[in-house]
């Protein structure tokens, strides 16, 4: 059956072109572990390998401080392409001789899949990175009940420092989520007064450094990303912002005093997960605004410690 003349004439204005197939990177053999992270602020530079996101950077530091090296970094993967929509992810070659806690679940998914499955690699979410490293280094959690700290008391103290970092320090760090929230449209006022407005007394009149900064609305976000999709809107007063930065300054001061001249925090002989987290925060703080950065730069021991650890972490990574 021939195409009618008028229709054929119309189609002539929309010619069909054929292009050669793309040489997808997925067809290449994965030789080295590759971590997918949010990009660095200087990701266009060839030697930029550290993420500017605290969550991603703490896992980069964790891998490096555990002694791993030759790890590749990818900045070109969007969070939507990651497991559960959250970075970082670790892409590793598949090792058939090793059994992980997630192996059974992976086999189950492969059994019910109707499409092609790549058996040569595995993609791990952040919670699985610790187990992968332990297996890689032939280390078991039962080998060290103190997780690298000097004793049980120091291990418990490390939990308090983690809470301080993820609370008071993170609140003052202008992350990308914070900047995006400033652009969000203001939410309509609640139909009834919130619980906070009933229980918490009104703040005192704003004075000092932050008094000239106007109030603004932002969408609340949880440190390190919450799995909840519930968001709210709150108007932050200058007095509240001032209180946040006062707590932040006190936390940085305590951090500096605790470090002193030690090589690792809490006097540990070797780096611990706490050191990885502290480095991630110090690095991101030193890349942020002067108002936040000054609290760290005025403390020489923190700056010197961050510089030393940064060299160790950067040496463990290369651009993919």
Image (cartoon, rainbow, N blue to C red):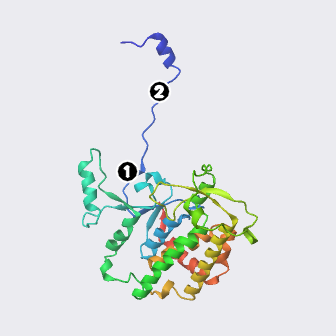
Viewer-nearest residue: 320 or 212:
212
Viewer-nearest residue: 24 or 65:
65
Residue 310: percent from left, percent from top:
54, 74
Residue 73: percent from left, percent from top:
47, 62
Cα separation, mark 2 vs mark 1, equals 28 Å
> Residue 243: which quarter of the image?
bottom right
Q: Is residue 132 visible?
A: yes
Residue at the spot 58% in from the left edge and 57% down from the top edge = 193
> Residue 293: which quarter of the image?
bottom right
Residue 223: percent from left, percent from top:
52, 65
Pointer 2 or 1: first along the chain:
2
> Residue 172: which quarter of the image?
bottom right
Total numbered badges shown on the rendered structure: 2
**Residue 27 tag number:** 1
Residue at the spot 67% in from the left edge and 63% down from the top edge = 237
Dot 2 corresponds to which residue?
A: 16
Secondary structure beneath label 2: loop
Secondary structure beneath label 1: helix
> Is the N terminus in the top left, top right, bottom left or bottom right quadrant?
top left
Residue 165: percent from left, percent from top:
53, 74
């Amino acid at each position: 059956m021939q195409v009618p003349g008028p229709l054929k004439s119309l189609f002539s204005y929309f010619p069909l072109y054929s292009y050669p197939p793309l040489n997808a990177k997925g067809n290449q053999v994965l030789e080295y572990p590759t971590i997918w992270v949010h990009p660095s602020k200087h990701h266009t530079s060839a030697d930029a390998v550290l993420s500017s996101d605290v969550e991603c950077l703490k896992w980069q530091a964790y891998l490096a401080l555990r002694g791993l090296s030759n790890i590749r970094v990818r900045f070109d993967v969007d969070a939507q392409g990651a497991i559960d929509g959250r970075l970082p992810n670790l892409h590793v070659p598949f090792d058939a001789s090793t059994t992980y806690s997630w192996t059974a679940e992976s086999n189950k998914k492969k059994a019910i899949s109707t499409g092609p499955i790549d058996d040569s690699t595995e993609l791990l979410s952040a919670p699985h990175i610790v187990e992968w490293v332990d297996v890689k280094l032939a280390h078991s959690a039962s080998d060290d009940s103190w997780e690298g700290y000097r004793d049980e008391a120091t291990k418990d103290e490390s939990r308090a420092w983690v809470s301080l970092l993820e609370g008071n320090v993170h609140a003052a760090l202008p992350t990308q989520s914070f900047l995006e929230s400033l652009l969000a449209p203001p939410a309509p006022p609640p139909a009834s007064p919130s619980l906070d407005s009933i229980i918490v007394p009104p703040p005192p009149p704003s004075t000092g450094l932050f008094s000239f900064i106007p109030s603004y609305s932002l969408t609340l976000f949880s440190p390190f990303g919450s799995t909840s999709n519930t968001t709210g809107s709150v108007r932050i007063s200058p007095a509240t912002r001032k209180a946040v930065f006062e707590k932040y300054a006190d936390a940085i001061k305590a951090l500096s005093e605790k470090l002193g001249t030690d090589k690792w925090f809490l006097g540990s002989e070797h780096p611990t997960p706490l050191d990885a987290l502290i480095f991630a925060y110090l690095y991101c703080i030193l890349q942020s605004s002067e108002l936040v950065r000054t609290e760290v730069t005025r403390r020489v021991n923190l700056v010197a410690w961050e510089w030393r650890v940064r060299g160790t972490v950067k040496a463990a990574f290369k651009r993919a």
